[in-house]
Amino acid sequence: MSLNYSKIPFTSLFAEARAEQQNIAQYDQFSAAQDILNKAVFLQRTAFSSQSSDVRFGFSTSPWRSVSFSAHYRRYEDDSRYDSGPLVQPSPTAYPTFIHSRELITDEVEADLVLHPTARFKTTFSYQYHATDYDLNTSPYVSFGKVISPGGELLAGEERSHVFSINATLTPMPRLFLSTTLSYQTSATTTAADGSPTVAPYRGDIYSFCANGTYVLNQNTDLTAGYFFSEANYDQNNFAAGLPLGIQYQRHSVQVGLTRRFGKNTSAELQYRFDYYDEPGSGGANNYRAYSVFGALTFRFR
């Protein structure tokens, strides 16, 4: 369902909503060679139901021809219920039997400012905030007579991110089109660790930059070039209390291409690309250099 209102001068309001319901009856069975403790059997029947809603509303305004501003708020909720009936299991609290329900709530805010001072130049400033909470309701978890978890309501995880970006397009001459985008993202994911320093928050930053250009050689031929760079730092350095997880990397990509149109319905494209990836934490195992040539012939039938 969607609504739009445009009676306010230079401004448009909008709202949209979606809802979904899902039910699944699942039967799981696993059998293997029986060991002396007769624990290599898994047999379970799980009933799953889910109700989700997605609501988004915002506005767009352009008081001047060269300036426009838009913003929206979005909320997504997913409520999942599990009704598991263990038939044969080594432990009555085995996964996923002990999970009763899971609730996922996402809040999102985004704003964009567009400046178009001349016909040849346009720039966009964007900001996005994203937050997700994961809530669980579980049974008590008992292992060998010891209570590992008392069960009940639990905030299992949280995700938070901020994304800042700027985009610009420029046409310095009639046949040359340039565009570039610079973005910065900072995010953090935390999970319920019961105060243990072993599981550290997954926190870090990503920097991205891309630039593209197109030069029109003639009416039927275009020359394109592009460069992409991305750097991430999610290195946790959790040597003292746990595992040194996380990731650091740099990625570079360069490509050039030529597009040729043969009439209205046929075109051909030839592209060369070079990729370089460096991940220090892998000791060089994941590093690579890649060279690729891509060709395409397109026919359009009417």
Image: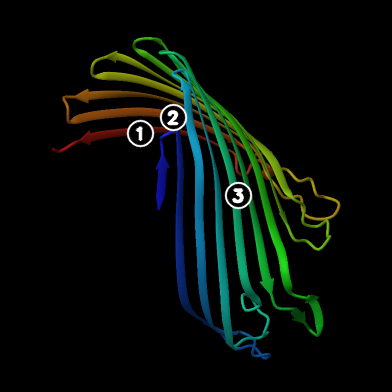
- Mark 3 lies on a secondary structure that is strand
Badge 2 vs badge 1, beta-carbon distance below 8 Å: yes
Left or right, residue 207 beside residue 241: left
How far apart are the two marked residues, 3 and 1, measured between alpha carbons?
A: 40 Å
| Disc 3 packing (10 Å; few <14; some 14–19; many ≥20) | some
Residue under the image location 30 percent in, 13 percent down: 217
Which residue is under mark 3? 107
**Which of the two labelled residues, at mark 2 and mark 1, occupies the earlier sequence position?**
2
Question: Amino acid type of disc 3?
Answer: Asp
Badge 3 vs badge 1, beta-carbon distance below 8 Å: no
How far apart are the two marked residues, 3 and 2, measured between alpha carbons?
A: 38 Å
Does residue 201 appear anywhere in the picture? yes
Q: Which mark is residue 273?
A: 2
Question: Amino acid type of disc 1?
Answer: Phe
| Disc 2 packing (10 Å; few <14; some 14–19; many ≥20) | some
Residue under the image location 83 percent in, 56 percent down: 197
Left or right, residue 173 beside residue 25: left
Q: Nearer the viewer, residue 236 or 77?
A: 77
Badge 3 vs badge 2, beta-carbon distance below 8 Å: no
Does residue 233 appear anywhere in the picture? no
Q: Which mark is residue 227?
A: none
> Which of the two discs, 3 and 2, sits closer to the camera?
3
Which residue is under mark 1? 294
Question: Amino acid type of disc 2?
Answer: Arg
- Mark 1 lies on a secondary structure that is strand
Residue 160: give x, y in percent of width and height. Answer: 67, 46
The count of marks equals 3
Residue 4: give x, y in percent of width and height. Answer: 41, 42
Within the image, what quadrant is residue 221 found in? top left
How far apart are the two marked residues, 2 and 1, measured between alpha carbons?
A: 8 Å
Residue under the image location 41 percent in, 46 percent down: 3
